[in-house]
Amino acid sequence: MSPRLKLRDIAFFERPVQFARPFRFGAITINATPQLFVRAEIEVEGRGSAVGASAELLVPKWFDKRPELSPAQTVDGLRRSLQIARGLYLAQTGFQTAFHLHASCIGDQVAACAKENIPPLAAAYGPAEIDKAILDALLRAVGASFFDGMTDNIAGIDGRMSLDLTGAEITGFLKTRTPLPRVAIRHTVGLDDKIEGEGGVADACENGGAHYFKLKLSGDPEADAARLVRIGKELGKLDRDYKVSLDANEQYADLVALRALVGRLDRDQALQSIAGRLLYIEQPMPRDVTRETALGPLAARDFIIDEADDAYDAFLAMRPLGYRGISSKSCKGLYKSILNATRAAQWTSGAETFFITGEDLTCQAGLAVQQDLALGAFIGVTHAERNGHHYVDGFGETPAAEARAFAAAHPDLYADAGQGIRLKIHNGDLLTGSLHTAGFATSVHPDWSALRPLEQPGSFKEQLA
């Protein structure tokens, strides 16, 4: 039986993160943004108290892309999501499983955020981060690793949040998991990233020896095709084979524009080096358009949703429209990732293959990247986008002692090659061995005294008035 717990406290902190180079995706360019840290204290029935932690960037203009909002306003929306979730979680005063606590709050969370004009994807951010910290504390309390704990369904995940899955089916899927010992990195090529020459996509000092590349799209079929031709020429210089994915971040307005791009991929000989290695196209159209638009013949290529994954039924809704995959991101909710992975496994047959991918918008060195990596390795994501090591200088603003503590506890993940402690990439892969430790994929926590309290936004609804 899954252990029951009750919350004692939830505290939020943040730390500035300065980017080493601009990261442009969709219509936004990021040069800096805060990183969130969550500290949760719980009492586990019959086992005493424990403290857990999680971390994630507060990324502007991704969870909420409405053009009338400034980047700072969208970050405040995430802060408000956290505040609302904290109130709802702490209002649950009895002992219950970790998943029951989440399920008891998520509906009210989405409704309360809607009243403050915060959309569902941003609304889910608060519970997603709290859930990770609670799970870390629970695993520490019982002395289990994430992998062993989740195999035994320590969180008590059942079918109450799904229309199609039973608790027995979910538990059965969890019991079949064998965590991957290594996960390949997928190197992100942002819209402002250099393509040719030193510092370009084929430069091993930049791409970390990756065999997988994620190429951002702008939403202009002609401009994107021309840029992909340039990238294909550079990737052709690699001494190894490679695969690519394309990510439009909702920039293709409709099927007309999307057909134009796919048509170029199908017919243009200059694009064959990319088209022949293309794994899938990620979230091409805006989330509201996506939910109303069948892909039709375009579904001959594999498409996945990401930003449109804003509810527990998203994958169910997208399947009849021709989508075959969905992204796992810990900032969208680890429980949703697990349910979607269960669906992908159930739906896959000889005629059709469904899959879950690992996409990384918000994971910096330390807690965030380790917890997201462990989640992906557990549900079978063989390669995952890892852009934090590329756009941020190692541990960034993290105090040196804290960075050294993470490196000492997880020597297979971090190393100092003379330029400070950075993610350690082994022939294009990240190793997961040191993540087999009591807690959610981490032996250490951040230096809480070196963090500042989360900035307190006013009512997000009032900011929009």
Image (spheres, helix red, strand yellow):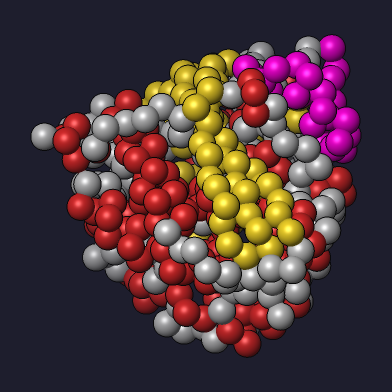
Depth order, front residue of 377/290: 377
Quarter of the N terminus within the rendering: bottom right
Q: Is residue 337 visible?
A: yes
Quarter containing the C terminus: top left
- Percent of width and height locating residue 31: 46, 18
Look at the picture and state if 270 lies above or below 281. Answer: above
Magenta stretch holds residue 213: no
Find residue 380 and report its horizontal and vertical position in percent: 70, 62
Look at the picture and state if 137 lies above or below 354: above
Q: Residue at x 56, y 56 (%)?
A: 7
Task: Give left or right: position of 332 versus 277.
Answer: left
Q: Is residue 385 visible?
A: no
Viewer-nearest residue: 438 or 324:
438
Magenta part of the chain: 395-418
Q: In the rendered view, does 210 fall on the left or right side of 268? A: right
Q: Is residue 5 left or right of residue 230?
A: right
Instruction: Judge whether residue 402 is colored magenta.
Output: yes
- In the image, what residue occupies the spot 44% across and 34% down? 59
Of residue 108 and residue 229, the one placed in the foreground of this image is 108
Give the total number of marks visible in the rendering: 0
Residue 365 as seen in the image, left or right of residue 443: left
Residue lying farthest to the left in this orientation: 465
Residue at 58% x, 84% y: name it: 167
Q: Give above or below for 452 relative to 256.
A: above
Residue 183, x across and y down, in percent? 75, 49
Q: Residue at x 79, y 31 (%)?
A: 406
Residue 191 in percent (x, y) is at 45, 27
